[in-house]
Image: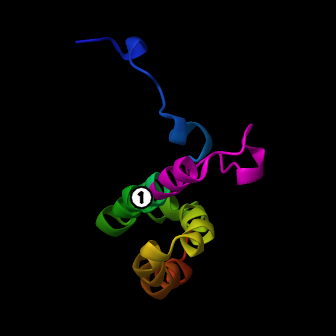
């Protein structure tokens, strides 16, 4: 089994479209081809709600609301990307109708 240092740390998407750095598309060093950008968008749109779920679990399961302080950030990127992709409109409707209102109701410390 390879050591941790022998494995790549990040895939290209994770380098510039992670939930934490929040790089705007304009900061990319080159204009990505349309297919590459679509693929990055779709991967990132999948990752952000997943990360939101990881942080929401301690809140709901263990009563630890501090984990949701940064939660709105995980919905900003999908909200920016989803309008560009008609096939992802059902996800946009779910986030707008369920996830965003639920986040607004949660009181964080």
Q: Is residue 36 a member of the stretch shown in magenta?
A: yes
Q: Is residue 35 left or right of residue 60?
A: right
For residue 3, above or below residue 100:
above
Specify how the rendered protein is coloured: rainbow
Q: Is residue 53 left or right of residue 23?
A: left
Front residue of 103/63: it is 103
Q: Position of residue 104 (x, y in %)?
A: 56, 81
Front residue of 72/28: it is 28
Front residue of 35/45: it is 35
Q: Quadrant of the N terminus?
A: top left
Q: Is residue 41 left or right of residue 80?
A: left
Residue at image mark 1: 46
Q: Quadrant of the C terminus?
A: bottom right
**Picture quadrant of residue 73:** bottom right
Q: Is residue 24 visible?
A: no
Q: Is residue 64 a member of the stretch shown in magenta?
A: no
Report the span colored magenta: 19-42
Element assignment for label 1: helix
Q: Position of residue 105 (x, y in %)?
A: 52, 84
Front residue of 58/30: it is 30
Residue name at image x 64 percent, y 45 percent: 32
For residue 68, above or below residue 92:
above
**Picture quadrant of residue 91:** bottom left
Residue name at image x 46 percent, y 58 percent: 42
Could you tell me how many numbered marks the image carries?
A: 1
């Amino acid at each position: 089994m390879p050591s941790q240092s022998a494995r790549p740390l990040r895939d290209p998407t994770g380098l510039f479209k992670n939930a934490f750095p929040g790089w705007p598309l304009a900061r990319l060093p080159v204009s990505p081809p349309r297919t590459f950008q679509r693929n990055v968008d779709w991967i990132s749109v999948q990752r952000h709600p997943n990360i939101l779920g990881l942080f929401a679990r301690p809140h709901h399961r263990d009563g630890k609301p501090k984990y949701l302080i940064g939660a709105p950030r995980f919905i900003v990127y999908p909200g920016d990307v989803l309008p560009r992709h008609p096939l992802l409109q059902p996800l946009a409707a779910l986030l707008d109708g369920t996830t965003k209102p639920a986040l607004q109701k949660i009181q964080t410390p």
